[in-house]
Image (cartoon, rainbow, N blue to C red):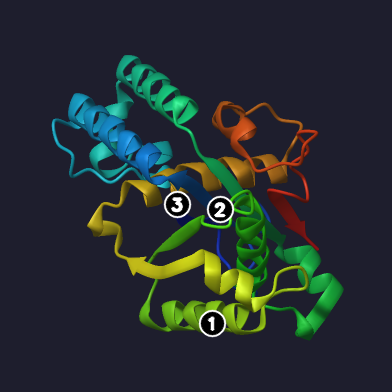
Amino acid sequence: MDYHFFLDESGDHGLTTLDPNFPVFVLAGCLLESSDLVKHEEEIKKFKLEFFNSTDVVLHSRDIRKCEGSFQVLFDLELKKKFYENLNEIISKTKFKIIGAAVNKVEHIKKYGKGARDPYSISLAFIIERLIFSLDGDTKNTVSITIERRGKKEDQELLDQYNIIRDRGTYFVTPDRISQRITEFNFFEKRDNIIGLQTADLCAYPLARHILNSGEPYIPFQVIENKIYCDKNGKYNGYGLKTFP
């Protein structure tokens, strides 16, 4: 089967500026089989037409939460309730897997000091490793990876890191396994309106909220929790969701 993996982030990956209220960086990916992606895209387009009379609106977690831009319509509380109910239903019924990694930057710096590695590179290595694991059921499974552009310098650094992982492999995955599975590693702009990237964005923040306070009920996380890649016993911590250090 052909799969598509969409990656997005929540939080700042830099180590020079730390927000005490949001000290984590989360990288989250959504894995969809091609036919499931087509169905999901159709559902999201219908959803956008219903609430915005256009498919051009880009679903962005922060803008939705802050009711900014096109989402100012959500100041209407009845409309907001319906918006979230419909969106949660679409996310819930769509067939996909989530693979996420988080770095607590405060603890990361405490433990490694000046030797602390870039949270993005740490997260990417884990996610690619688990992505390969998730495709191991069939030797013919391949996947394309899609990432949102952040900036010329940042994108080049990320591409360089990906190429290092691809060339060297990881502790558990050989370079050959990676090259056999991953067919593409592409960047797109937010304005390109890639629905898979928007879905990954909608999943990244709930993962971060859960990591920051796992005891606090949060509906968006509850909607996606059973989609996190897990072992045969349903355990996802350390499998489909890894927290460093």
Q: Is residue 216 visible?
A: yes
Q: Residues within 10 Å of mark 1 (few under 14, many from 20)?
A: few
> Who's the residue at 41% across and 19% down the image?
85
Q: Residues within 10 Å of mark 3 (few under 14, many from 20)?
A: many
Q: Is residue 23 visible?
A: no
| 211 lies left or right of 120 | right
Q: Secondary structure at mark 1?
A: helix
Q: Where 205 sits versus 107, above or below?
A: above
Instruction: Name the foreground residue: 23 vs 131.
Output: 131
> Who's the residue at 83% across and 71% down the image?
110
- How far apart in space, not on screen, are marks 1 and 3 (Cα)? 20 Å
Return the disc, 2 or 3, that comes first in the chain's sequence: 3
Q: Secondary structure at mark 3?
A: strand
Viewer-nearest of discs 2 and 3: 3
Instruction: Name the foreground residue: 180 vs 206.
Output: 180
- How far apart in space, not on screen, are marks 1 and 2 (Cα)? 19 Å
| 142 lies left or right of 100 | left
CB contact under 8 Å: marks 1 and 2: no
Viewer-nearest of discs 1 and 3: 3
CB contact under 8 Å: marks 1 and 3: no
Instruction: Name the foreground residue: 35 vs 209.
Output: 35
Q: Secondary structure at mark 2?
A: strand
> Who's the residue at 44% across and 83% down the image?
156
- Mark number, residue 28: 2
* Residue type indicated by callout 1: Asn
Return the disc, 1 or 3, that comes first in the chain's sequence: 3
* Residue type indicated by callout 3: Tyr
Q: Where 31 sits versus 26, above or below?
A: above
Residue highlighted by disc 3: 3
Q: Position of residue 132 (x, y in %)?
A: 62, 60
- Mark number, residue 163: 1
| 23 lies left or right of 143 | right
